[in-house]
Image (cartoon, rainbow, N blue to C red):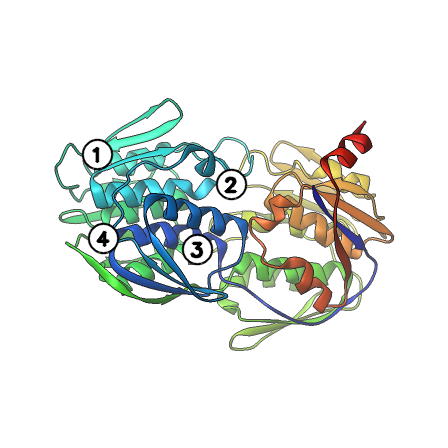
């Protein structure tokens, strides 16, 4: 078992470089199954979710060659297997993109129902709606999401998503890429990683229009060829470092970002008294004085991202006055509140609303990361807290943040990794 030990209360200074976007990579890599040729993918983040996707692709028969630390050549030309291994897929939410890719290529797919973070009810009904509209017969049986076209080619369709779903938008887009005719997705999500997926597919020969708007049109093509593509920077990783310096104080330069993707985060932090200077592909983030209270509600893009909610909560814990957090996307995103209270935070949760009364300081404590972004929020809080914080279950964090310990050390934080044996952990727990 691994945990992070953070000695906080120290401002951050220096530079940090942002990795490729997790939420783009975990869709683009499965989409390589549609390509008849070699895809060279650059700026791939070195995170555990990506490692799982790559291991699944290999198990299906993909040939993967390392070019450098963040670049891979992926050739799925010889893949014939249409069934994804159960254990690997159950560890990751994004395994459902493998379903769309396999179905789009072979006309059949057999993929375990997805795992990932427990954020409450996360149905796949909109995925099923989009895929069924394209002509597939879909069922859930024995823990697997199964579909077949019974030997016929998928047909383009007009699809209206009942809710704005990032996953369903991307999965329907992947599935429709090789379908016959025109597919129209209305009420589509608009996140940057949706645009990135569309750009990747188009660079391989797809015909996708409107990504980034609420109406996406996919005109099916007969074949995708290989090519070169570079994944966009991760807006949530960038936002997490913005939150970290906002909570702990100091001044950092965040490199390899697309500032436009960070507009909603920048606006809230500036409202709270943080200074942010935008350059072409970098940000300077500085906080010296007191933090102001703020009300934050999460929305689909271009609203404030739900994946930044725990991190902004950590900053609000140190702001003067009372702040209101409203979760507008998921049902169960406040599981971290009890852990924050261990550190001296004053946060009360009622359904999708959290009331945060700012305190003068947080104090270090043993805490447990209950999901990916909650774990990131605990790191933000720990960096600002006086004393030592021990964060357990950091495997959640490593699903989405590349080399976060080294990056924080570059900013002057006192953080290290401690590994304890199962026997030591059970003794401590007892």
Is residue 318 shown left or right of residue 234? right
Q: Earlier in the sequence, mark 2 or mark 1?
A: 1
Find residue 25 and name its label: 3
Question: What residue does disc 1 label?
Answer: 136
Q: Secondary structure at mark 4?
A: strand
How much space separates mark 2 and mark 1, taking CA atoms?
Answer: 29 Å
How much space separates mark 2 and mark 3, taking CA atoms?
Answer: 22 Å
Question: What residue does disc 4 label?
Answer: 218
Q: Which dot, 3 or 4, sits closer to the camera?
A: 3
Q: Secondary structure at mark 1?
A: loop
Q: Nearer the viewer, residue 372 or 126?
A: 372
Q: Is residue 76 above or below residue 204?
A: above
Q: Nearer the viewer, residue 116 or 276?
A: 116
Q: Position of residue 312 (x, y in %)?
A: 66, 52
Label 1 close to label 3 by CB (< 8 Å): no
Find residue 329 and name its label: 2
């Amino acid at each position: 078992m691994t945990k992070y030990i953070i000695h906080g209360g120290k401002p951050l200074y220096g530079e940090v470089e942002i990795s490729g976007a997790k939420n783009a990579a975990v869709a683009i890599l499965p989409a390589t199954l549609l390509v008849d040729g070699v895809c060279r993918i650059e700026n791939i983040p070195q995170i555990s979710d990506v490692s799982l996707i790559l291991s699944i692709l290999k198990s299906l028969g993909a040939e993967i060659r390392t070019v450098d630390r963040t670049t891979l050549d992926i050739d799925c030309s010889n893949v014939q297997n249409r069934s994804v291994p159960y254990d690997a897929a159950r560890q990751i939410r994004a395994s459902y993109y493998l379903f769309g890719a396999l179905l789009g290529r072979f006309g059949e797919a057999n993929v375990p129902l997805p795992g990932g973070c427990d954020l409450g009810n996360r149905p796949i009904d909109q995925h099923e709606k989009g895929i069924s509209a394209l002509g597939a017969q879909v069922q859930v049986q024995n823990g697997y999401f199964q579909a077949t076209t019974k030997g016929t080619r998928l047909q383009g369709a007009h699809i209206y998503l009942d809710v704005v779903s990032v996953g369903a938008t991307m999965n329907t887009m992947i599935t429709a890429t090789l379908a016959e005719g025109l597919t129209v997705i209305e009420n589509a999500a608009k996140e940057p990683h949706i645009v990135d997926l569309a750009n990747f597919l188009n660079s391989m020969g797809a015909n996708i229009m409107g990504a980034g708007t609420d109406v996406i049109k996919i005109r099916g093509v007969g074949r995708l060829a290989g090519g070169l593509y570079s994944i966009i920077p991760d807006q949530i990783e960038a936002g997490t470092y913005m939150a970290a310096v906002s909570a702990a104080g100091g001044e950092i330069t965040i490199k390899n970002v697309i500032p436009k993707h960070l507009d909603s985060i920048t606006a809230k932090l500036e409202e709270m008294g943080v200074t942010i200077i935008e350059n072409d592909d970098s940000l300077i983030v500085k906080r010296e004085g007191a933090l102001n209270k703020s009300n934050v509600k999460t929305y689909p893009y271009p609203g404030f991202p739900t994946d930044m909610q725990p991190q902004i909560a950590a900053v609000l814990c140190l702001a003067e006055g009372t702040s209101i957090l409203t979760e507008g996307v998921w049902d169960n995103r406040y599981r971290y509140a009890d852990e924050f209270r261990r550190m001296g935070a004053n946060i009360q949760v009622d359904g999708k609303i959290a009331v945060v009364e700012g305190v003068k300081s947080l104090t270090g404590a043993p805490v447990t990361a209950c999901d990916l972004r909650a774990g990131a929020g605990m790191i933000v809080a720990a960096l600002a807290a006086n004393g030592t914080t021990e964060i357990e279950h950091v495997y959640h964090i490593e699903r989405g943040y590349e080399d976060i310990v080294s990056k924080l050390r570059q900013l002057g934080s006192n953080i290290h990794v401690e590994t304890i044996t199962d026997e030591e952990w059970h003794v401590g727990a007892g």
